[in-house]
């Protein structure tokens, strides 16, 4: 079914765009919520008369998007979360958590426009999220996840072998320092 969008619809188009969608999507969602109107001569004429106003709003959205991009890229979000001893989170950090933290710092972004690596963050560290803006524009948001307690860093196998070798050398050197005559137990001369 061919429709004309009354306002911006995420992942579909912007106000004034002509789109082809499934019949049920148009009849049951877009038209009843007044997000779109059916494509016909009368509606096309109405949108042609509003074309200048629509273009002006698109230009304003682009300027606002550029300002928002500068704000987002200037911020580094730091979150402190509950973790286990190895740095693995109890739960995960999602795009909803990130949107909430951005809102606290004065930047309003819809959660569905925030793309996290692998959809969620499940460990401590530094990450970069992609925030979709107007059109094809996007901004990169730096995120630092910190633990609420001290983390035990995993030890590499090479370090373990090195420590074990040092322990063996110390044991060998400590055995050599004891004189042999002191290690013998004197026999008792008394008979019981």
Image (spheres, rainbow, N blue to C red):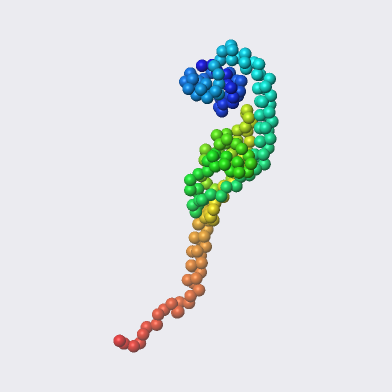
Q: Residue furthest left?
A: 192
Asked whether, in this view, residue 153 is left or right of residue 53, the answer is left
Image quarter hosting the C terminus: bottom left
Instruction: List x then y, in percent, for residue 67.
Output: 68, 35
In this rendering, does residue 26 appear at all? yes
Look at 56% across and 28% down and name the residue there. Answer: 10
Look at 55% across and 34% down and name the residue there. Answer: 112
Q: Quadrant of residue 62?
A: top right
Instruction: List x then y, in percent, for residue 87.
Output: 52, 50
Depth check, front residue: 168 or 119: 119
Asked whether, in this view, residue 153 is left or right of residue 105, the answer is left
Q: Quadrant of residue 99?
A: top right
Q: Quadrant of residue 100?
A: top right
- Vertical relation: 40 (above or below) 108: above
In this rendering, does residue 115 appear at all? no
Q: Residue furthest bottom?
A: 190
Instruction: List x then y, in percent, for residue 125.
Output: 57, 47
- Vertical relation: 57 (above or below) 81: above
Look at 61% across and 23% down and name the residue there. Answer: 15
Instruction: List x then y, in percent, for residue 144.
Output: 59, 46
How many numbered circles are shown?
Answer: 0
Look at 68% across and 37% down and name the residue there. Answer: 70
Depth check, front residue: 122 or 32: 32
- Vertical relation: 111 (above or below) 51: below
């Amino acid at each position: 079914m061919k429709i004309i969008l009354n306002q911006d619809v995420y992942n579909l188009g912007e106000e004034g765009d002509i789109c082809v969608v499934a019949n049920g999507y148009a009849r049951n969602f877009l038209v009843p919520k007044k997000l779109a109107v059916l494509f016909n001569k009368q509606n096309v004429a109405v949108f042609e008369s509003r074309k200048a106003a629509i273009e002006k709003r698109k230009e304003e959205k682009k300027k606002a998007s550029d300002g928002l991009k500068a704000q987002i890229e200037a911020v580094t979000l730091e979150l402190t979360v509950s973790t286990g001893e190895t740095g693995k989170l109890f739960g995960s950090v999602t795009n909803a958590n990130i949107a909430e933290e951005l809102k606290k710092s004065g930047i309003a972004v819809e959660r569905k426009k925030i793309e996290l690596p692998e959809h969620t963050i499940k460990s401590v560290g530094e990450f970069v999220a992609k925030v979709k803006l107007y059109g094809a524009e996007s901004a990169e948001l730096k995120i630092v996840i910190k633990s609420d307690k001290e983390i035990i860093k995993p030890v590499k196998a090479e370090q373990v072998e090195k420590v074990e070798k040092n322990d063996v050398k110390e044991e060998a050197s400590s055995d050599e320092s004891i004189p042999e005559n002191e290690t013998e137990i004197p026999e008792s001369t008394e008979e019981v």
